[in-house]
Amino acid sequence: MSDPEMQDFDAEVIKIGTADIGKTLIKDVHKDSLIEIADLAENGIYHSKFEGEFGWYDKQFCAFVRHDWYRKYWDLPLGLPFHMDLMKRLVEFRANQNKDISDIDFQDDGDWCHLNYNIIIPASATTIEDALKYANQILDWIDNTVQTAQDGASGLINDIVEKYNETSLLNLPDLIHKVKTTTDIDEKGKYLEELVARFFSEINGFHIIERKRTKTEEIDVVIVNKSDQEIWKTESNLILVECKNWTKNRAGKNEYVAFREKLGNRRGRAKLGFFISGKGFAKTFGLEDLRNSKTDLLIVPVDLKQLIEIIESQKNYSEELQNLYVQATMK
């Protein structure tokens, strides 16, 4: 068998179930036969376990891989042409680096796209099960790499949607009104997240790289500190902001300790944090802060009412934040 294009027409296709592939020796496979790994279901229909067949190509035993895509039903964030191009490039890379892929063939007929190639099974493989494991290792590497690209594209799209959503279009007075009046916890958290992010984004040199809300009414913001202001440039590279979106309880000792651990878990890159509480702070928060006053970690408590008052009064955000920072160091 010298021409892989003729396999579909001239070769005998033998179906073998997964229960038998460990007992089927490669050396016993006839040169003019193709092995399709498929299990027979109760309804009498075979379910293929591999995208292609196995057989001999000249003197090498191969997995003949066949990827087929239909444009009409493609719905992944990374478009079909880019998905296919990336997969083809990965196959070519593997062929060049490991020399275990050959005869790469790509076809685009408009509605359908096809990528075919041969995976050369090493001589150490003795059974069809060995051949399947080797081929699947390569397919898994390709699939995982492409899936990472798809996830990245999806994340980028989600980031853009998050950035240009309904909350981002609200002006500050309307946003503050939503924070004050919205009773739905999830909706309130959405507006509060936007308000906190906008406030810290206005500080010169503060660049927000992460913002998220959790199911526990908590908002986390991670800031890269690139400020050239004296008071900030001596601080850590990362600044953390946590906001407890609580409507009943004040933040206390437990919340202080948990936030301090978050700072400590940033490999020494985060030593400054701002803790914003929707209902203010219990005495235990301040007492725990005093117990840790000799460490180089600083947590600045900010009552949400203070934050809103700063924004509503149109005060200088940077100066007011510096005042809160200085007050925290004096306790």
Image (tube, rainbow, N blue to C red):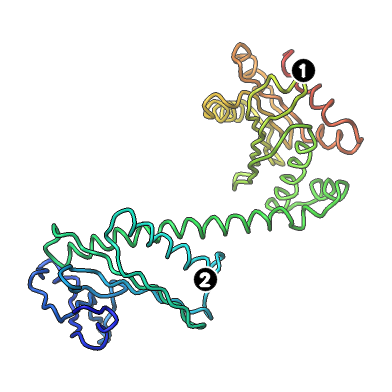
Q: Which residue is mark 2?
A: 80
Q: Residues within 10 Å of mark 2 (few under 14, many from 20)?
A: some
- Farthest residue to the left: give it: 28
Q: Nearer the viewer, residue 6 or 207?
A: 6
In the displayed structure, would residue 163 be above or below residue 313? Answer: below
Task: In the rendered structure, find residue 326 and report the number of the disc placed on it.
Answer: 1
Please identify the quadrant where the C terminus is shown. top right
Q: Residue at x 29, y 75 (%)?
A: 52
In the displayed structure, would residue 316 be above or below residue 42? Answer: above
The amino acid at mark 1 is Val
Q: Position of residue 51 (x, y in %)?
A: 32, 73
Q: Residue at x 7, y 73 (%)?
A: 28
Q: Image quadrant of residue 248?
A: top right
Chain-order first, disc 2 or disc 1:
2
Q: Nearer the viewer, residue 85 or 37?
A: 85
Mark 2 or 1: the one toward you: 2
Query: Which SS class for mark 1?
Result: helix
Q: Image quadrant of residue 18?
A: bottom left
Q: Image quadrant of residue 43?
A: bottom left
Q: Residue at x 54, y 25 (%)?
A: 264
- Farthest residue to the right: give it: 313
Q: Residues within 10 Å of mark 1 (few under 14, many from 20)?
A: few
In the displayed structure, would residue 329 be above or below residue 265? Answer: above
Q: Position of residue 60 (x, y in %)?
A: 17, 67
Q: Are the two marked residues, 2 and 1, in contact with CB atoms closer than 8 angstroms? A: no
Q: Position of residue 251 (x, y in %)?
A: 66, 31
Residue 162 in the figure: left or right of residue 326? left
Q: Nearer the viewer, residue 135 or 183?
A: 135
Q: Residue at x 69, y 40 (%)?
A: 246
Total numbered labels = 2
